[in-house]
Image: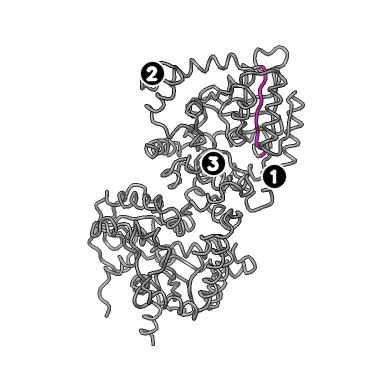
């Protein structure tokens, strides 16, 4: 049984704990045993996007201390329910932690985004979830372009029996961008409207993505202008977990 | 309107995605040529100068935009020139040459149709390949009709025919033709120019003097490299396998030749480019000005080129503007990005634009140093707190108590709801369940 350390991400830990719990359920349904390293905090991504790499590096050192210490013989993989936080570790850590580059690269090599781990590492597309619904996918930017993800979420959705309806430009940014959403709220909001409009054009029930930040942005906009409208933004872990049989 | 225009351009470009130059291997070869050049930029420039001089070309080296303007203005004045025709060139936009010529009492006419419209409107180009893409056809009619002094029909062909006729006269009476350079081959001393309207060829053959303004990174080692780079440029700029006109210039008119200028001058423009060599931004000098990163950028597509308040817009402008100005211009531009990395993916010479935009946020000196200091203090305190589990627990507990009501969130919450921290964190839930 593969053993996975959950890299929960601060956003899931503090704001969306249900999504974190769903991630654990999905991983377990796929046959993995999940442990939670309690000393983890945040990967440092907010600081690097704010233009403060020194502050980000401090968090990155801590993250590397916590997850790098896990015995490779004991833990098979480190998995996060976020393409963006995974990209921080895999794409940015080796340069950010130049003096610990070898360690950082080793950590990057065993850190995976949830759908990447399920489909590309475990080779699982059917975790036993059954979904009788329609879904459209938003390709979150960092998963798509830093990690090369795309087909994984779609295969899992279809593996659960849901109908996939592609929107126009599924690979265009939702407009969040961390500090960008505060610094340029008008453009950021227009991009969210554009994404929500494309998603609505599919008449799907759910708008699924692998990044809570995008979903927080899109759902935040939806709740402001059209609460209750579809598609409802939802994380892939929440969607899949909702189709799993009740826990014994 | 802009989004529709860009969408049409994007569709053309996607169709061109099947051409050979859109193939990943082609990009790899192009990226390798550009990096080979940057490894010894000064050496290639010396070789280019040597080849150009051997062909009877005059080479001028300008380290600043002011130097470059002075070279051109003095050349024009020494020859008693009155009228200059210009082919589309970002380098001359960069040094604001048109205005410098006007200030020196010369008439300077842009001859690319889009540039001509923008010049008549008293504006700046909003896109480096399609300068007037922000204008609708009726708006263009108004601009041209005002210049014509008569009414013109809102009709693409009629308007183009009017401009063509008007510009033909300008070509014939111009004393000097000014162009940029797309590539300059060090081995042969050949200047390569890409245009679609033939105006570049008029500028380089009709006037007695041709002056080419060439940013230093335009040098390529061998003319044969153009075989890779040219189709790459046109495929990613306009979706064409090759532009309508590709002009290769090898010196002024020689005895027995029927056309070409009496004099050919090339101005090597540095403008801080060589200071980028050996830095993490060196690869920005690989840019071939195709505009692919603009077309895919969600922010550019929303705000248009003028919002950048800079000659270079879009993702490449966010990187190049602060670098070329030493941070005095465009210091805020790197923040105007969602960091979606669509630009990095689109770049045909594989410049990591997204990573550079991110790095510049830390590296560009902030004109508002007070704000930068406060920002640094905030993130330093945050990093200290969150780099220990106890500090993280304490601060997130405070966040829960305040239910996320912290100051400074209005920019978000005026258009979007912000979720509140959960009553119980995942880690607390996990600890309870696994006690």
A187 lies above or below B227: below
**Residue B162 covered by magenta stretch:** no
Picture quadrant of residue B161 = top left
Q: Position of residue B147 (x, y in %)?
A: 46, 20
Which type of secondary structure does the marked residue at label 3 adopt? loop
Residue located at (36% from left, 73% from top): B403
Question: Given the current orientation, which residue lies at the most extreme bottom position?
Answer: B435
| Mark 2 belongs to chain | B
* Front-lying residue, B340 or B223: B340
Q: Distance of mark 3 from mark 2, alpha carbons?
A: 32 Å
Residue located at (69% from left, 44% from top): B274
Which type of secondary structure does the marked residue at label 2 adopt? loop
Question: Magenta span covers which residues?
Answer: B208-216
Point out the tag, 2 or 1, that comes first from the N-terminus.
2
Q: Is residue A222 left or right of residue B75?
A: left
Query: Is the same chain shared between marks 2 and 1?
Result: yes
- Image quarter where the C terminus of chain A lies is bottom left
Which type of secondary structure does the marked residue at label 1 adopt? helix
**Residue B212 covered by magenta stretch:** yes
- Please name the residue that numbered disc 3 is placed on: B310
Give the class, few, some or many, for how many residues have Cα within 10 Å of label 2's Cα (few <14, many ≥20).
some
Q: Distance of mark 2 from mark 1, alpha carbons?
A: 48 Å
Q: Is residue B387 left or right of residue B154?
A: right
Point out the tag, 3 or 2, that comes first from the N-terminus.
2
Query: Is the same chain shared between marks 1 and 3?
Result: yes
Give the class, few, some or many, for how many residues have Cα within 10 Å of label 1's Cα (few <14, many ≥20).
some
Q: Which mark is residue B152?
A: 2
- Please name the residue that numbered disc 1 is placed on: B274
Q: Distance of mark 1 from mark 3, alpha carbons?
A: 21 Å
């Amino acid at each position: 049984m593969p053993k996975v350390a959950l890299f929960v991400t601060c956003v899931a830990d503090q704001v969306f704990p249900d999504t974190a719990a769903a991630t654990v359920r999905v991983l377990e349904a796929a046959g993995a045993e999940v442990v939670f390293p309690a000393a983890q905090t945040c990967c440092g991504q907010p600081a690097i996007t704010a233009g403060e790499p020194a502050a980000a590096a401090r968090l990155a050192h801590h993250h590397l201390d916590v997850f790098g210490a896990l015995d490779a013989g004991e833990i098979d993989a480190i998995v996060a329910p976020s393409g963006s936080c995974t990209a921080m570790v895999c794409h940015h850590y080796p340069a950010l932690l130049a003096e610990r580059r070898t360690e950082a690269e080793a950590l990057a090599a065993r850190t995976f985004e949830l759908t990447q781990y399920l489909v590309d590492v475990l080779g699982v597309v059917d975790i036993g979830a059954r979904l009788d619904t329609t879904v459209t996918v938003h390709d979150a930017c960092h998963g798509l372009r830093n990690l090369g993800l795309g087909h994984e979420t779609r295969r899992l959705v279809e593996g659960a029996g849901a109908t996939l309806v592609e929107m126009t430009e599924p690979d265009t940014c939702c407009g969040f961008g961390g500090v960008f959403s505060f610094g340029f709220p008008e453009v950021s909001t227009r991009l969210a409207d554009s994404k929500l409009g494309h998603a609505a054009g599919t008449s799907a029930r759910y708008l699924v993505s692998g990044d809570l930040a995008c979903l927080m942005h899109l759902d935040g906009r939806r709740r402001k202008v059209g609460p209750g409208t579809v598609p409802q933004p939802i994380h892939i872990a929440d969607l899949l977990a909702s189709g799993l049989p009740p826990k014994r | 309107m802009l989004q529709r225009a860009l969408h049409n351009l994007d569709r053309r470009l996607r169709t061109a995605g099947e051409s050979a130059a859109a193939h990943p291997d082609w990009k790899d070869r192009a990226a390798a040529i550009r990096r080979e050049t940057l490894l010894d930029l000064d050496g290639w420039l010396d070789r280019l100068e040597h080849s150009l001089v051997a062909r009877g070309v005059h080479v001028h080296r300008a380290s600043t935009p002011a130097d470059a303007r002075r070279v051109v203005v003095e050349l024009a004045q020494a020859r008693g020139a009155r009228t200059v025709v210009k082919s589309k060139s970002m380098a001359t936009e960069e040094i604001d040459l048109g205005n410098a010529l006007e200030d020196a009492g010369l008439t300077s006419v842009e001859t690319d149709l889009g540039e001509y419209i923008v010049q008549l409107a008293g504006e700046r180009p909003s896109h480096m390949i399609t300068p007037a893409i922000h204008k609708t056809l009726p708006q263009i009619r108004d601009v041209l009709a005002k210049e014509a002094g008569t009414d013109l029909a809102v009709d693409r062909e009629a308007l183009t025919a009017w401009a063509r006729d008007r510009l033909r006269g300008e070509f014939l009476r111009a004393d000097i033709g000014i162009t940029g350079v797309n590539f300059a081959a060090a081995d042969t001393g050949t200047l390569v120019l890409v245009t679609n309207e033939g105006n570049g060829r008029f500028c380089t053959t009709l006037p007695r003097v041709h002056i080419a303004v060439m940013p230093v990174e335009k040098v390529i080692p061998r003319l044969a490299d153009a075989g890779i780079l040219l189709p790459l440029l046109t495929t990613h700029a306009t979706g064409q396998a090759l532009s309508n006109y590709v002009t290769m210039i090898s010196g002024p008119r020689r005895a027995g030749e029927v056309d070409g200028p009496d004099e050919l001058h090339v101005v090597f423009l540095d403008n801080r480019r060589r200071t980028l060599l050996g830095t993490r931004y060196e690869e920005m000098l690989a840019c071939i000005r195709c505009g692919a990163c603009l077309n895919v950028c969600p922010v550019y597509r929303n705000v248009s080129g003028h919002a950048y308040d800079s000659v270079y817009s879009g993702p490449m402008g966010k990187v190049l503007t602060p670098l070329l100005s030493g941070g005095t211009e465009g210091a805020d531009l790197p923040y105007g990005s969602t960091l979606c990395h669509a630009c990095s993916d689109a770049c045909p010479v594989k410049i990591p634009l997204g990573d550079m935009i991110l790095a510049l946020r830390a590296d560009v000196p902030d004109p508002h140093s007070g704000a930068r200091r406060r920002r640094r203090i905030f993130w330093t305190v945050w990093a200290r707190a969150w780099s220990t589990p106890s500090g993280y627990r304490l601060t997130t507990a405070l966040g829960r108590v305040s239910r996320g009501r912290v100051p400074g969130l209005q920019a978000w919450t005026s258009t979007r709801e912000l979720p509140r921290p959960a009553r119980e964190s995942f880690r607390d839930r996990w600890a309870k369940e696994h006690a």
